[in-house]
């Protein structure tokens, strides 16, 4: 498939989560060895809840799939309660039939982060690339932890986080943005764009303005998510609140 992003609008976050699970379930039925790219944060929580429930009921089988998470904070271990690995274990991996060796993460505690980023790129390539990449969208337009900047990094890299992004992740660190690590490791824009299919999910009123810019505005490094317009096989899934600005005239 090719063309501009396909836009779907759902009544609420739960209806969107069910539709996204339907999409992933259908992809798994067609390709049991599916390679999934996964996000963290508040947006996918209901999706992970629905997917886990279906796996527990035997309606979805993840046993032959593989996953790659988009990003991780620098300077914390996998066991840290604020790490994205800890988040994923709690919300998804502890509840589904996916072997630990088939879940792939960046190691934020690596002593050589340049080599760690290169290792991750090699693992993605060895898996045959990502079949279906699910993305959230930051209120400043970031995807993964690719922040607005004069230029965007192509491959997995180390990045300094904006204050807005640290604030958005404060719930993982006792609500204190100052405790959120100042840096992270993230898949790069080219790595994301090499996924065969992409689904971008945005929910809630705070995302409405950036969604409108992403879908109607120019492609710009000031809004990293806008680069998805060049991919050719992107679905944008929105709830009514996030779609409010886009739906005006």
Image (spheres, rainbow, N blue to C red):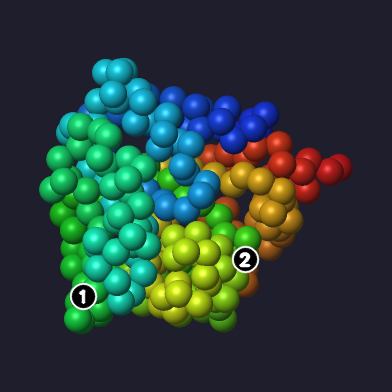
Q: Nearer the viewer, residue 159 or 82?
A: 82
Query: Counting residues from the N terminus, which is met first, the one under dot 1 or under dot 2?
Result: 1
Q: Nearer the viewer, residue 127 or 218?
A: 127
At mark 1, the secondary structure is loop
The residue beneath circle 1 is: 110
Callout in the foreground (1, 2): 1
Q: Measuring from the top left, give residue 22's x and y in whole percent.
A: 44, 25
Q: Measuring from the top left, give residue 93's x and y in whole percent.
A: 27, 41
The residue beneath circle 2 is: 140
- Using the image, tell me which numbered label, if any, was put on residue 177: none
Q: In the image, 143: left or right of 89?
A: right
Marks 1/2 in contact by CB < 8 Å: the verdict is: no
Mark 2 nearby-residue class (10 Å; few <14, some 14–19, many ≥20): some
Report the residue at 45% width, 36% height from top: 47
Q: Measuring from the top left, give residue 66's x and y in whole percent.
A: 22, 43
Residue located farthest toward the front when viewing the structure as drawn: 174
Q: Nearer the viewer, residue 43 or 226?
A: 43
Report the residue at 34% width, 31% height from top: 52
Q: In the image, 153: left or right of 215?
A: left
On the rendered image, what quadrant is the C terminus found in?
top right
Q: Is residue 59 above or below residue 162?
A: above
Q: Is residue 46 visible?
A: yes
At mark 2, the secondary structure is loop
Q: Is residue 233 visible?
A: no
Residue located farthest toward the right when viewing the structure as drawn: 249
Report the residue at 22% width, 48% height from top: 103
Q: Is residue 174 above or below residue 202?
A: below
How far is disc 1 from disc 2 in space, using C-alphas? 28 Å
């Amino acid at each position: 498939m090719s063309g501009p992003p396909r836009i779907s609008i759902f009544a609420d976050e739960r209806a969107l989560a069910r539709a996204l699970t339907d999409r992933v379930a259908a992809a798994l039925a067609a390709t049991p060895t599916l390679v999934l790219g996964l996000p963290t944060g508040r947006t996918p929580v209901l999706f992970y809840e629905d997917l886990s429930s279906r796996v527990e009921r035997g309606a979805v089988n993840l046993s032959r799939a593989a996953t790659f998470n988009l990003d991780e904070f620098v300077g914390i271990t996998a066991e840290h309660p604020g790490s994205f690995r800890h988040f994923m274990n709690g919300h998804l991996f502890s509840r589904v039939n996916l072997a630990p060796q088939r879940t792939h993460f960046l190691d934020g505690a690596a002593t050589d982060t340049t080599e760690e980023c290169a290792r991750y790129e090699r693992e993605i390539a060895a898996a045959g690339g990502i079949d279906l990449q699910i993305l959230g969208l930051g209120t400043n337009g970031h995807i993964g932890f690719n922040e607005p900047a004069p230029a965007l990094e192509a491959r997995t890299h180390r990045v300094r986080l904006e204050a807005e992004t640290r604030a958005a992740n404060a719930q993982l660190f006792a609500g204190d943005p100052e405790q959120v690590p100042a840096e992270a490791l993230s898949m790069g824009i080219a790595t994301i764009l090499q996924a065969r299919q992409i689904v971008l999910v945005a929910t809630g009123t705070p995302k409405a303005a950036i969604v409108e810019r992403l879908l109607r505005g120019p492609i710009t490094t000031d809004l990293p998510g806008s680069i998805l317009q060049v991919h050719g096989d992107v679905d944008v899934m929105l709830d009514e609140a996030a779609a409010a600005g886009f739906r005006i005239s």
